[in-house]
Image (tube, rainbow, N blue to C red):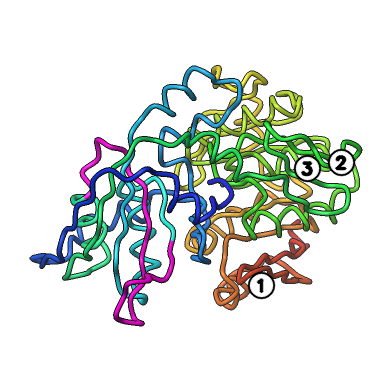
Amino acid sequence: MLMASLRNLLFRRVYTCSTTFYIPSLQLVRPTSALLPSLSTLGHFLPAPRISGQAKEWRCLSPLLASFSTSSEASTNEASASSYLSVRIRCRKDVADMLSDALLCFGASSASMDEPDDCDSTDEISINSIFTECQDVGACISNAAGSIGLKDMPSYVVTMGEHCDWIKKTQESFHPVKISEDLWIVPEWRTPPDAQATNIILNPGLAFGTGDHPTTKLCLVLLYSLIKGGEFFLDYGTGSGILGIAALKLGAALSVGVDVDPQAIRSALQNAALNNVGPQEMQLCLVDSMGNPLSAVGTTDGNVKGQSSHGIRLVAEKEKFDIVMANILLNPLMEMADHIVSYAKPGAVVGVSGILSEQLPQIEGRYMQFLEGMSVSEMDGWACLSGRKRITKYS
C-alpha cells in the first residue's frame, strides 16, 4: 500500500547538481524475457499505479523511505547524509507506463513522468527516477527495458548531488487526507486537522496504503458506509494496515489482515501501535502467493514477535467474516476470486479494488457468480466493485 504519491516537483528539485553524464541510446541484442517473472511476482498484492504527472505509490523500494518515522532519529540523520542519483530517462509514450513499473522492480526508488521541455518529438516523454549512489543505473535501465521487450535502450541523463534533506522534504509532502467529514488519515508527524474526528495515524513509506491513492480512498469510503458495529473484517493484501485499523476505529470487533510481504506485516503492526490497536483486536498473517498461511503475528510494538496460532486459525477458517476487502492487483483478483470470497459469510459484503475502470468488465464477469447486487464506485480512473456473497442452499 506504497505510500501516497510524492510530488513530481520534489524529485526534480531535491538535488544540487554537481556532475551530469549523458548516455546515448544503445541497441540491445534481444529482450530479456527471462526477467519477466520478477515483474509478475514483485508487489503481488500492490495495485499497479497509473501515471498522472506525479510519482508512483510504491512499497518502500528504497531503504531511505523506510525511515520516515519520527521515532527513528538516528536512521533519519544517516539517511539525510547520503548521496543519491537523479536519472531522467527518455522513452516513447506508449511504453512509458510499463517501463516505469519495470524500473521500480529493478531497483529505482521512484518513477514519475513529465513532458520534456527539450524534446523534439511529441511521442516522447521523460521518466524521472531516483537511485542510490551505489546502484548500477545502466544495468537497471537495461534490465527494465529488456523485460518489457524494448530493442532500443532509452537514452538517459544521470545527475549526481548531495542529498538535500530528503526526509524533511518527503515528510512535508505528506498531508492529512480527508475521507469523509469525520474520517481522516494523518501522517504521524502531522497534527490532526479535526481532533474530534476519527483519525487514523500512519507512518507513510513503509507499505502501500496511505489513504491518498484512489483505490485506498474507494475502499475506505465503502468501509465507512458498511461498519455498523461488531463486525469481523478481513483485509486481503493489508499493506500498511490502513483498512483494518479504520474498520476497528469505526466500530468493528475484529480485524484480520493478510499479505505476502513481510515488510507489509511489519508496517501494519507499527501503524496498529500508533493507533493503540492491540493484538486482541487486530491479527496479521503472512501468506504465500496462493493465500496459504505461513505465520500470524499480533503485537503493539511494531516488531514481529513470533507466531499466533489464533491468527492462523482465523485465516484458515471459511465463511467467518462480515466484510471482506481486497485492494490488490487485477491478476490475483481474477485468479483467487473463489479463495477471497470464501472467507465471507453468506450474505456478507465483499469489496475488491486495485483495478482500473477499463478493467471492470473482467472483474464483473469473474465475480458475478459469487456476488449479487454488485455496485461500482470510481475515482480518477480507478474502480471498486462490491456485492453480497450469494446465499445458496448449501450455505
Inspect the magenta stretch and tell me whether residue 269 lies in it: no
Q: Which residues are magenta?
A: 113-137
Q: Locate residue 62 relative to residue 294 in the image: left or right.
A: left
Q: CA distance from mark 3 to mark 2?
A: 19 Å
Q: Position of residue 213 (x, y in %)?
A: 62, 56
Place residue 299 in its image quadrant: top right
Give the labeled residue for mark 2. 194
Q: Residue at x 69, y 70 (%)?
A: 378
Q: CA distance from mark 3 to mark 1?
A: 25 Å
Q: Considering the numbered disc 1 on the image, is that residue within a helix, a strand or a loop? A: loop
Inspect the magenta stretch and tell me whether residue 123 lies in it: yes
> Label 3 is placed on what type of residue?
Ala
> Label 2 is placed on what type of residue?
Asp
Q: Residue at x 62, y 28 (%)?
A: 269
The disc at residue 226 is: none
Give the labeled residue for mark 3. 247
Quadrant where the C terminus lies?
A: bottom right
Q: Position of residue 329 (x, y in %)?
A: 51, 59
Mark 2 neighbour class, 10 Å CA radius: few under 14, some 14 to 19, many 20 or more = few
Which label lies toward us, 1 or 2?
2
The disc at residue 368 is: 1
Q: Considering the numbered disc 2 on the image, is that residue within a helix, a strand or a loop? A: loop
Residue 316 visible in the snapshot: no
